[in-house]
Image (cartoon, rainbow, N blue to C red):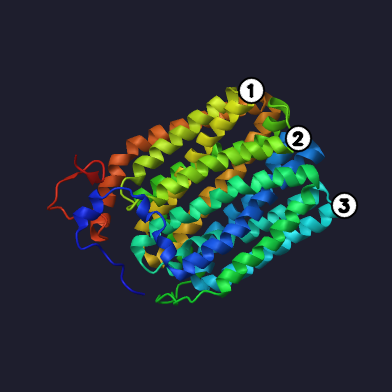
Amino acid sequence: MKKPTTSSDPQKKVLSGSSLSHAWRALRHRNFKLFFFGQSISVIGTWMTRLATTWLVYHLTHSALMLGIVSFSGQFISFALGPFAGVWVERLDRRKLLVWTQAAAAAQSLALAALTLAHVITLWEIIALTALQGLINSLDMPGRQSFLVQMVEDRNDLSNAIAINSSMANGARLIGPAIAGLVVAAFGEGWCFLIDGLSYIAVIASLLLMHIKPLDLRRSTASMFEQMREGWDYVRTFRPIRTILLLFSLVSLMGYSWSVLLPVFAARVLHGGATTLGWLTGAAGVGALASGLSLAARKSVVGLTRMIQIAAAMLGIALILFGLSHTLWLSLVLMVFVGFGMLQTASASNTIIQSLVPEDKRARAMSYYTMAFFGSAPFGSLFAGALADRIGAPHTVLVTGTFCIAGSLWFTLELPKIRKIMRPIYQEKGLLPMPDITINPDILEPAK
């Protein structure tokens, strides 16, 4: 693979800041452009299924606890298989892997559609099919994240590709639930599952149309368990990645559980229905989309550690205020901030990890990111569902929001230590000027 190109004037590159003119530069790569348009269609369907599933479970059970259990059943498998998945992904052709995972996800959605449209769906079938989706995601997530480097040949565009990918996913978060709320109200949940199943055709076609250069990696002779241990030792001992993953795990554990409780807020707190749920989910999508666009406009990963700190605190504060709100318009405004804080934490963490990790450990490192995302969230969903059954959904998000703020404060104390380690790595990659140019040693940004 070609070495990444670097700017001939590194100081100019660092001092240039954000510019909308560069916000979409990763789309000049043909393969990434194909992926972007194919995935955009597919992810709209995915968000329709997510909303339809939560509403269907709540319609069948009227239980916050069961909402948590269903969410747990899908995400726990991604957590349990995370270390194995990272090693498997590094041993497989990632494009072929993604074709198979997308085809399996399509089959899962079509099965949900058939059972629901036939009016024979039961809670246990939803749990089983959600668990199957968790198995698929355990391979799809690290495969998709590590495949980005093959779609974007210029490494300087990698962070932009991650941001655009996040923007696309969260534009779908805005569109998908809004459509799903209308479809569920008019025709029922089964049609959302059917649309989702058919939408996977777009992303599978985009993968098959790509011209991918194989990665120039030497196959390891080590056993799977030796590679798993090597990946774990790397994540455990490299302080910047360890610190970022710990905060992201806490935010996933506590800060993401609000989504499980949204049907309760829509029905009991705000006295609405599926359309209200769609508006709340869509409002979070507006914030997440704004976050993705702000990241896409950045020219460099420099300064993203500060954004992680701010975003985690923003998420916590917005959740606390959302728990206190009983007015629809105010809840929608707060959901925008929740969505922004949630996506900013996830995408900034992803970008920094990808900018630091060596290629031969990329899939394994991203499998731990997947574990933090899909692994902590199920326990948070179970915790939130059980707690909401006891103290109510509003008081539950007060608790989870407080934990997010505490995590942000801890990360603030860790920032000077991890930046000291990151500076020479970024200098070597051309993301920061070399030491002959004055740099504030504490903030990884040019001195004022």
For residue 5, which quarter of the picture?
Answer: bottom left
10 Å neighbourhood of mark 1: few (<14), some, or many (≥20)? Answer: some
- Judging depth in this view, the residue of 179 and 212 nearest the camera is 179
Indicate the amino acid at tag 3.
Val
Find out whether the residues at labels 2 and 3 contact each other: C-beta distance under 8 Å: no
Q: Can residue 93 be seen in this snapshot?
A: yes
Please say whether residue 257 is visible from this viewpoint.
Answer: no
Residue 31, label in figure: none
**Residue 135, x across and y down, in percent:** 64, 59
Query: Vertically, is 8 above or below 346?
Result: below
Q: Which residue is depicted at the point 53% across and 36% down?
A: 336
The residue that disc 1 covers is 326
Indicate the position of residue 52 as horizontal and vertical percent values: 72, 46
Q: CA distance from mark 3 to mark 1?
A: 36 Å
Numbered label attached to residue 120: 3
Q: Position of residue 217 (x, y in %)?
A: 40, 75
- State whether residue 65 is above or below residue 117: above
Circle 2 sits on which residue?
63
Badge 2 local density, few (<14 within 10 Å), some, or many (20+)?
Answer: some
Using the rendered view, name the quadrant where residue 204 is placed.
bottom right
Q: Earlier in the sequence, mark 2 or mark 3?
A: 2
Q: Residue at x 63, y 53 (%)?
A: 44
Q: Amino acid at mark 1?
A: His
Q: CA distance from mark 2 to mark 3?
A: 20 Å
Q: Quadrant of the C terminus?
A: top left
Kind of element beneath mark 3: loop
